[in-house]
Image: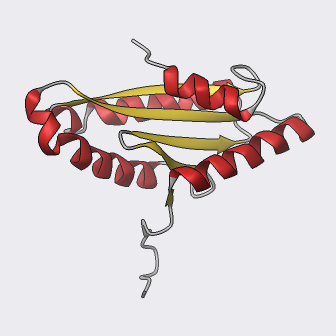
Amino acid sequence: MEHVKGERHLYGRVLDQELFLFLLDLEVKRARRYQNFLSLMSLKIESISKEGEGGGVPTCYQTLRDLLVEEVRECDIIGSLEKDRLAVLFPYADAKAGNHVKSRVEDILKYSNLGGEGVEIIVDQISFPNNGADTMELISRVLKSNPS
């Protein structure tokens, strides 16, 4: 595959669930050992209309994935948690930094046309160690989250 100078490629930037969870576990262990922080942002796509059930969620997922690749740093880790949920891991980011990124992503989503596809994107952010003491606790919290 040829790469054009200055062009960012999607290939390899969005990890599957298994690899994402593996890297999350490694980062949590590293953060615990060296007493660092990390933040985890979750973006859940929910269908809000009958029209959105057909192609809205998969199309929105792809668009959201592409948007995240453009908006986050290359050192941040983007992964799939479920068929309708993406997550971004921000190593060494405390809750304040995580909330700043969450706010920025929410602002970007306000001006995108993703809501016009019969879907709603729910953004949540948690941090280690504030919202969980280990990987399973963080994942459980992310999957149960449904902020209003």
**Left or right: 121, with 76 as reference point:** left
Which is more toward the observer, 69 or 48?
Answer: 48
Toward the top, the furthest residue is: 148
Residue 107 lies, in percent from the top left, at 37, 30
Left or right, 85 with reference to 78: left
To which quarter of the image does residue 44 belong?
Answer: top left
Q: Considering depth in this image, is 122 or 144 the residue closer to the camera?
A: 144
The answer to whether one can see residue 62 in this image is: yes
Q: Position of residue 14 (x, y in %)?
A: 48, 57
Q: Residue furthest left?
A: 51
Identify the residue shown where x is 12% and y is 41%.
Answer: 54
Quarter holding residue 116 = top left
Colouring method of the image: secondary structure
Q: Residue at x 39, y 11 (%)?
A: 148
Q: Nearer the viewer, residue 10 or 104?
A: 10
Q: Tell me what residue is drawn at x 68 percent, y 51 percent.
A: 23
Quarter of the image for residue 120 reads: top left
User: Camera-side residue: 18 or 115?
Assistant: 18
